[in-house]
Amino acid sequence: MATEYILRMGDGKRVSMTKEQIKEDTLAGAGNAVDYGLVPELSADEIDKLIEICTMPGKSVSVEYGMEIPVSHDIGTIRLDGDQGNSGVGIPSSRLVGMMMHERAFGADTMELGHIDYSFKPVKPIVSNECQMMEVAQQNMIVPLFYGAMPNMGLYYTPDGPFENPGDLLKAFKLEEAFASMEHSAEHLTRDIVWIMQKLMASGADGVNLDTTGAAGDADAYGTLTAVKALREEFPEMYIEVGSAGESWIGMHGMLEFEGTVLAGLWPHQQVKLVEKAGASIFGPAVNTNTSRTFPWNLARSVAFTKECCKASTIPIHADMGMGVGGIPMLETPPIDAVTRASKAIVEIAGADGI
Amino acid sequence: MPIAHIMASGMTGLRAGGDLVARMQLSKSMKIKEAKEYVAKKVGVDVFDLADEYAMRDVREDLGIGVITSVPGAPKGIAAKMNIEKVLDTKINCCDYFRNQIKQ
């Protein structure tokens, strides 16, 4: 009887697989990235290394000595004091306590301050509160401290925002109106990100972490990249981290361009070239997890995409490795066995500069 | 989950030298190899030592760039960052901000 190894499905459920099954899924997952993203195939050695990581004894694994990388953090203290919607654990603690706990107790390499909604738009009315918190936090913190938020352009559409929902307009075949709504929303998104970060930079912020860029499609990415460009021009030494929402920016608009490149349908190794042009310091590619596939399938696919992104990039890559991205199961409490295996693979095989 | 990443691949922040390497990646867009070599040279250790808590503990305390435990009298917060600016030869926005608030 063949030896079986305990692994996971993309939703986190435990499964047993033989080495042959692991190899089959590893090849298929990497092949999927090649088919969709037109990235190079992983070499035979890299496939063997992935199988080795998946079959290592022990519940958790780690990188080899000397291969350690910085781990930058998104969502800030909401992880501690937030509710389930943000995967928070509901500990009633102040944001300063949360930041200092990450720095002094958890060994975080960077940290960030963020609004409980973790989106830029709701920060506008309370920006002075965020500025005073940033000032206090910077007096007490040592690790790099961002202001973090999601561009989250969906908040600019009705019923939450001023512009008609392009989803409704597209369903009614009002194409021109839908395009105009997305373009106006992107303009407002850019304006808000820049205005908020001007205030926070004047209060001592190290920089900004733009989390889940492109979540509302190509116009969301357009608005964010335009904001990054404006911020870089105004603050040449600002720390700017841009994390993507997904492996491909969805063409809700379809015709928007940044610096002469159409944004719709770009894969991580193409996204990073525009993020570089905009002036970001670090890029975080996201490769989405398929919950119906196994961990080896998802991990191989993520490694193939991320490796090409690292190769194409001139700026450091901090791969997005949260719940449901980077090969990690789509689960609020991703199993440690899967997290550590994905962590090791993305550093040692894909060559990420950080997570 | 972030702690699982720190344990599996991380440089453990103030416990060793992770915050310093991250700062150079962010301020100068250095890739991991360049950032590690830069920081190691500036703090006077081997690249291999940067993620070693034993090696970095005394280095951090001697340079006044912050340690993980609360040592009475040791530079903390903004004071430690002002020392990091000098050691890494890099500008930190909040240090400028607070310096500008001091009346001459």
Image: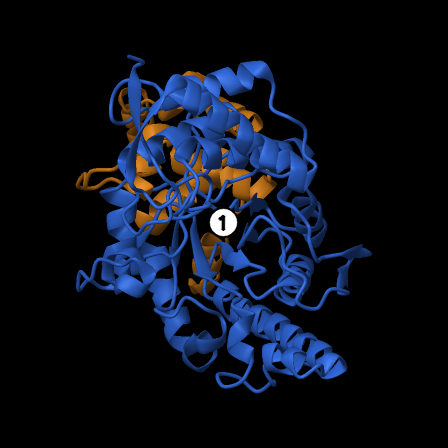
Chain colours: A blue, B orange
Give the x, y percent position of residue A221.
Answer: 63, 61
- Depicted B27 relative to depicted A60: above or below: below
Q: Which of A236 and A173 is in front in this view?
A: A173
- Residue lying at 35% horizontally and 46% vertically, measured from the top left: A11
Q: Which of B62 and A211 is in front in this view?
A: A211
Task: Give me the chain letter of mark 1.
Answer: B
On screen, residue B4 versus residue A294, left or right, reads: left
Q: Classify residue A33 by image quadrant.
A: top right
Give the x, y percent position of residue A55.
Answer: 35, 19
* Three-letter code, disc 1: Ile
Q: Nearer the viewer, residue A115 or A183?
A: A183
The secondary element bearing badge 1 is classed as loop
- Depicted A187 relative to depicted B1: above or below: below
- Residue lying at 58% horizontally and 15% vertically, measured from the top left: A44
Q: In which quarter of the image is the C terminus of chain B?
A: bottom left
The residue pinned by badge 1 equals: B92
On screen, residue B60 versus residue A90, left or right, reads: right
Give the x, y percent position of residue A282.
Answer: 57, 44
- Depicted B49 relative to depicted A7: above or below: above
